[in-house]
Amino acid sequence: MTIGLAGHVAAVGLVGLDLAARTERLRLLLGAAGQRIAGGEAFRANLLADFGSAITPMRVGGEPARAAGLRMAGVSWPRVVAALATEVAVAAPVTVGVGVGLLAAFGGQWWRDAGLRVRQSPGSIGSWVAMVVVVAGLAWWVRRRWAGHGGGSVAVAAPGSVADCPAPSRPGLAGGARIAGVAALLSAVNVLCRVSILPVLAWSAGDTTAIGTLAVGAFLLIYGQLVTPSPAGVGMVDAAFLAGGAGATDLGLLLAWRFYTTGVGAGLGGLVAATRLSQLRLGRRER
């Protein structure tokens, strides 16, 4: 299959919207924790998270990489932990909710279309069923476990840090509810953009698989990376895709989908990481 120009343009737009939503969400939650941060710094911190997630099993390196990026931007540890823990608490239920909604709406269709291919693919059914069963629960567990670190110290900022420049007052109940609502909306944009990339590419290539089947398959493959013991789910996710688990089996679609959902963020994040390391080395030499 050949993916048309419109499909690539739409995929680039979805990736850009996803990055913008995550950047704004991070800035919003840091503001609620008492720290203003430039959009560029939040953007680079998220790219570092994409890079860390892509090179580690179960994406466990993402949050530590983002925390390191925020620290290099001058955000104190208490505010880093407060913002990222709040993000996990807001984003995880949204992600699970979107997954449950997709399964409720299109799960039967996916099972009839993609599930049949997977069941007929030798050696793949056990790993695929395991992924489907545990992905939602373990995604929540992994995120919540990380968020629990440093739980009692998040309310106090380190004196003398950059975070102590004039900052917004701590929001009250109504303000906190508004911030949580906006963060949840941005989290939904994040998940829906990532899930939509595969259907858009398939549509552009002329694939006739039902959109609901592709959407469920994309969700399970993307968030299945949270439970796979290899960086970015390499191997298991690709095998599941080519076995029909995504609703499509074309190699070109797999490569394009992998590029837009993993490669772009990891590549840009790698450039940010290399630049940060160069700056650190230069700073040490000057001292």
Image: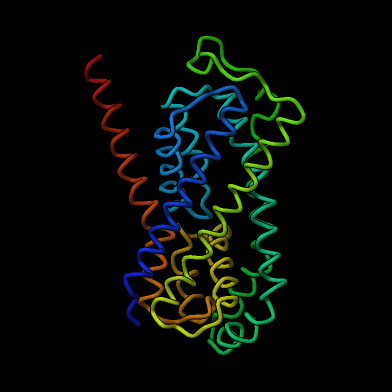
Horizontally, residue 261 falls left or right of residue 147, namely: left
Which residue is located at x 42 percent, y 72 percent?
Answer: 201
Quadrant the C terminus occupies: top left
Q: Quadrant of residue 151?
A: top right
Q: Residue furthest bottom?
A: 120
Which residue is located at x 39 percent, y 34 percent?
Answer: 40
Identify the image's colour scheme: rainbow, by chain, secondary structure or one colour. Answer: rainbow
Residue 287 higher or lower than 108, as above or below: above
Residue 8 higher or lower than 182, as above or below: below
Quadrant the N terminus occupies: bottom left
Residue 12 higher or lower than 209, as above or below: above
Percent x, y for residue 13?
A: 41, 57
Give the mark count: 0
Residue 85 higher or lower than 121, as above or below: above
Which residue is located at x 48 percent, y 41 percent?
Answer: 23
For the residue pair 178 and 196, the one nearer the viewer reads as 178
Percent x, y for residue 89?
A: 68, 42
